[in-house]
Image (tube, helix red, strand yellow):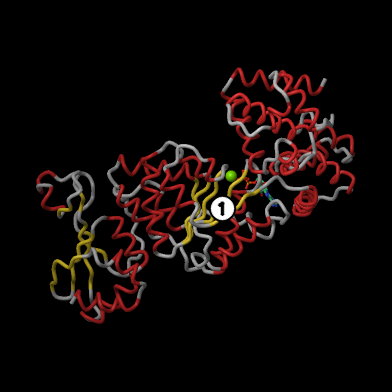
Amino acid sequence: VWDHCLQFIKDNIQPQAYKTWFEPIRAVKLTDNSLSIQVPSKFFYEWLEEHYVKLLKVSLTKELGDGAKLVYIIRMENTYGNKKPFTEKIPSNNRPSVPSQELDVPLKNKNPELKNPFIIPGIRNVKIESQLNPNYSFDNFLEGDSNRLARSAGLAVASKPGGTSFNPLLIFGGVGLGKTHLAHAIGVDIKDKYPEKTVLYISAEKFTQQYIESVKKNTRNDFIHFYQLIDVLIIDDVQFFSGKSGTQDVFFHIFNHLHQNGKQVILTSDKAPVDMQDIEQRLLSRFKWGLSAELQSPDYETRISIVKNKLYRDGVEMPFEIVDYIAKNIKTNVRELEGAIISLIAQSSFNKKEVTLDLASQIVEKFVKNTKREVSIDYIQKIVSDYFQMDVSTLQSKTRKRHIVQARQLAMFFAKKYTKASLASIGSQIGKRDHATVLHACKTVDNLAETDKQFRKYIDDISKKLTL
Ligand code: ADP
Ligand code: MG
């Protein structure tokens, strides 16, 4: 009977789904109109109930007639990973509190509320909900030179998930430049175009927590199974995987499975793959299979449209003078740009003040320090090389000696901080480097400033000299 059912099911679903969900099932007992099947875990059972209940019902009714019943028996994995029927493992006089005996579930009872000891808490929500924020759409992700490549790659992926060479699509860039927004936008668009696809957005941090939890609870296989079912997996901030070899390992397997089955993977990171540290080589090489697209700091035009769009969405009007002032002065980061507008709106409505240029400048000042004095890149290079007692030509040279590299990175950092020059232009002036190098330098300096006291002092000293 079960074989016939299986044949019918096989003809009606994707081969992959069949393989994953139906091949592991064993038929164990048939009495009158009731068939007992054994499934590997409770998670399995729930999944079948949720996704394939109709199919099961139809196939079983075909075989056994109208009153057909299906009984699930859940096998449990013991600690050694061998699968044994639950009943064999635990003597009946010593039943644990875990409710894992036969579940006699009528086929129409679709969503029995079961506490499932085999799955990671929260994972049931995850598998039903995409965890996407509908406010992060393509429509309000404004296009500019700084994001054109990433945005159009995102659109391409959204129109053919898994069907482009952008797999994985890795979006990288500094904080507040729109990585999370764009990643959601792709997911939202896919859900729109392909409602039947399972899309999941998850932060790398949460993924890691779930994984650790699954190891503790001995449900690592369920964890992997779950992720292997997803059609579009979006993992935000994968730099979080740095140094976490267990998580990297499990992600590697999930990634391979998804990729082989034509599923789409979308990743974001604050670094380009080449700059990622403590990530296994085999993972990095996977990241490079698809496309890595950078989000850069928005240019003036884009900043203007972002400000205007934000005001429009909030139903607020502001003179162009103000919009222009904000866009001119807040340059590095969209989050700060939005923050400045929000606080401007708040201030003006709170104090019932007109939005004046004066108010705008007070607020902008809080967001950016030291933007007033414009210094030249030449001047910065001179000050930095003097400080480290080297020539400007040494600073610009190709050498990889540590103290020279640091000085060069500091010069780039200050050039970004104190001038309006683009990353590309800073790079070309400081020893003919490209914009990615400059961006990397700025991030390195930011990091060191946080962790290295001596380095912090360099920054303070040079800052003082530059703004004197
Ligand atoms: P990241 O994840 O790179 O740190 P986010 O995606 O959180 O950055 O973006 C920060 C804020 O800036 C969000 O509110 C986002 O909506 C907004 N934002 C970023 N880029 C754009 C853009 N191109 N157009 C409109 N809003 C943007
Ligand atoms: Mg983010």
Q: Is disc 1 placed on a helix, strand or loop?
A: strand
Observer-nearest residue: 270 or 226? Answer: 270
Residue 299, given in percent of the width and then of the height, sits at 76, 48
Report the quarter where the N terminus lies. bottom left
Report the quarter where the C terminus lies. top right
Residue 220, given in percent of the width and then of the height, sits at 31, 47
**Where does label 1 land, which residue?**
292
Does residue 29 appear to the left or right of 51 in the view shown?
Answer: left
At 84% across and 37% down in the image, what residue appears? 360
Crowdedness of circle 1 by 10 Å Cα count: few (<14), some, many (20+)?
A: many
Ligand 2 quarter of the rendering: top right
Observer-nearest residue: 147 or 67? Answer: 147
- Vertically, is 110 above or below 119? below
At 56% across and 24% down in the image, what residue appears? 451
Task: Give, as a three-letter code, the residue at label 1.
Answer: Ser
Residue 342 figure quarter: top right
Residue 350 figure quarter: top right
